Image (cartoon, rainbow, N blue to C red):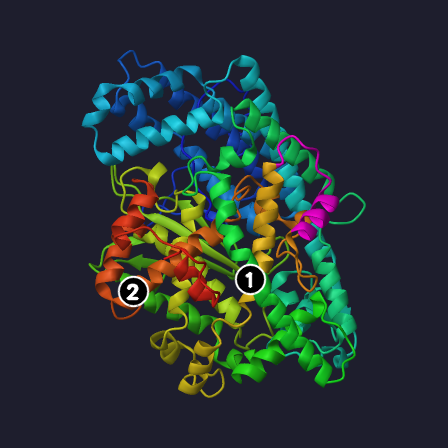
Amino acid sequence: MVVNQIILGGAGTLPLLPNTAAAAPSPLVEEWKGPFGGLPPFDQVQVAQFKPGFATSMATNRAELQALVNNPDAPTFENTIAALERTGRTQSRVRAVYGVWSSALSTPDFQAVEREMEPQLAAFRDEIYQNEKLFRRIEAVYESPAKAQFTAEQQRLTWHQYTSFVRAGAKLDAAGKTRVTAINQRLASLFTTFNQNLLADEEAQATVLAKESDLAGLPLSVRSAAQAQAEARGLKGQWVIANTRSMVEPWLAYAERRDLREQVWRGFVSRGDHAGARDNKPLITEILKLRAERANLLGYPTHAHWRLENAMAKTPENTMKLMAAVWPPAVARVREEVADMQQIADAEKAGIRIEPWDYRFYAEKVRKAKYDLDENELKPYLQLDNLREGMFWAANQLYGFTFAPAPAVPVYQPDVRAWEVKGADGRHVGVFYFDPYARSGKRSGAWASGYRSQERFEREITILISNNSNFMKGTPGEPILISWDDARTLFHEFGHALHGLCSAVNYPSLSGSSVPRDFVELPSLINERWLATPEVLNRFALHYQTGQPIPPALVERVRKAAKFNQGFATTEFLASALMDMKLHLAGNQPIDPAAFEREELAKLGMPPEIVMRHRMPQFSHIFASDGYSAGYYSYLWADTLTADAAEAFLEAGGLYDQTVAAKFRKYILSAGNTADPAEGYRQFRGREAGIDALMRDRGFPVPAGQR
């Protein structure tokens, strides 16, 4: 996951791209037209428009900033900090649409544009943050005694702008600024190549099955998806297991052919990890080296220290302390899980030792034996369309939102749909887009993207936000049946959307999910909890053939199995999070990714039956951008808050308690970055969160001395 932030700002001295906008008029740079305050013209966009669109938006941005810095009046909040919020609107519109093409429509012609543009966009960002006149005005407001008279939100915005500039290098000398700019441009190129290599491996590599007997054990929904994949590739009468998580994980859980499980598993965990033009390992080495150098130039011992300075965790040491507390019980639980699996394999006379490609397969057998719960028993009740309506319904119960289809909203692909969102008072709140299916050119996984932030400091501007998934289409006319894990992911990403829809701030830079990385996952993680409530399941978990609701006895078995396989889930995640932090604490030490991964996992005592959830050559969270670099721990940090926050609901009587929901909305969802999120959480909960709720939630023993 991650929510795309819209960054406002501009001006400087970078040479302009050739401005061909006049020769090729672009809807990208125009004010968005239509209802709801204007909408992205997705249906009018062509790849050829991006370069001239950026040229125009950069020129506009520069002119805006030139006027700001040349203002003869002394710097004030209004003529400097608020004025900066007004700049960059054209650039933001172009970036919003460009981001959609990058993540969801990455065709070869767009990828060529992306490779050219990313370094230039990085340089343009540095041009803004290294603008000496602009920074001096911001600094003057930040240090002014008049700041004490600002509203709390104005003080927070002033702090945010000042610290953002300082952390980007505004106080460096000329040589330092030049070097930081060069590093950022090179990193932008490396990030783009890493991501494009990964996408190419996911699209080019697949397992083709010619015999139906090879599909033994697979549920109908997975068979249908494999058949649809084959037909899309011109392989009618065959089946294809695509090299993406949405296909690989159900294959590993159900496929009876062990040799084919291993083949599919090896293809998946080897993405980006092979000799040749698409080998991501050399890119990783250079990325880490450049990040370490940049951190040192900016005055930090490591990239991890730079990244965490304004996070909730504050220091890498705090993150390592949390992960170190969870790792031992997680690994101990893995040993128990493997023992249970091995017992079944031995009883079946399989003659094997559990390997990574066996884990999910035998975990399903253990689930069935221990809890009388088969994922395939659940799937007929988990229709994608119904569950989407279920998450809408839960949002209505908690926050009063209603969702009405908006078919006239322009979309970028026929499968994308849009809904107008209204509040309990009937007023328009925003537009929610949903892009559910996997396709060529779309990166794997699930994420939320913001196209426009909520704000109201000059006028009311409402949010435009999307959820993006990679569910596999089956045979035309058949309902899309998804797994329980996929259903949780659906609710998870919708939590990010709710964070944006609940936003009620004045300034766009502080809006919605523009919060520290280790806080941004709290709204999404807690929203998963409403999936398993009887209120949602009884209404929306309806059998795709009979229309009957999921039986209460089956719901009870789901509840009892909630902590099942937590050793696996926690360990595969934590291995990636620990590796991320260790990589970025290594400083200037040269890194051989393969050796580092192998040696550090051995030091940790990584169970041999599990691999990291994201091995380094495919770890796009940390190597396709700076986004989650030294920050993948954030999911665990936020889940610590989530477990504690969920107990606040349960202590009050249940997950639909209106008083607690109102407090959660006020202090967590609506506040954006207008206050320190740690203080916001204390206001919601009345205290800080301890680790004990997390450990209870996962069925692990609570460490001595913890609450």
Does the magenta run of residues contain 458?
Answer: no
| Mark 2 residue type | Phe
Whether residue 322 is visible to the viewer of this picture, yes or no, is yes
Q: Position of residue 488 (x, y in %)?
A: 47, 66
Up-down: is 334 above or below 464?
below
Task: Look at mark 1 in the image and give the residue it sits on.
Answer: 330
Q: Residues within 10 Å of mark 1 (few under 14, many from 20)?
A: many
Q: Position of residue 211 (x, y in %)?
A: 78, 78
- On screen, residue 131 versus residue 233, left or right, reads left
Q: Secondary structure at mark 1?
A: helix
Please state, as top left, top right, bottom left or bottom right, where the C terminus lies in the image. bottom left
| Mark 1 residue type | Ala
Dot 1 or dot 2, earlier in sequence: 1
- On screen, residue 474 versus residue 42, left or right, reads right
Which residue is situated farthest in the right direction here?
Answer: 275
Task: Look at mark 2 in the image and give the residue it sits on.
Answer: 649
Q: Nearer the viewer, residue 387 or 489?
A: 489
| Mark carried by residue 189 | none
Residue bounds of the magenta highlight: 586-603
Q: Secondary structure at mark 2?
A: helix
Please name the predominant secondary structure of the magenta segment in the image: helix
Up-down: is 550 above or below 504?
below
Q: Nearer the viewer, residue 34 or 594?
A: 594
Up-down: is 561 above or below 319?
below
Whether residue 470 is visible to the viewer of this picture, yes or no, is no
- Per the model, the C-alpha gap separating discs 1 and 2 is 26 Å
Q: Nearer the viewer, residue 305 or 248?
A: 305
Does the magenta run of residues contain 600?
Answer: yes
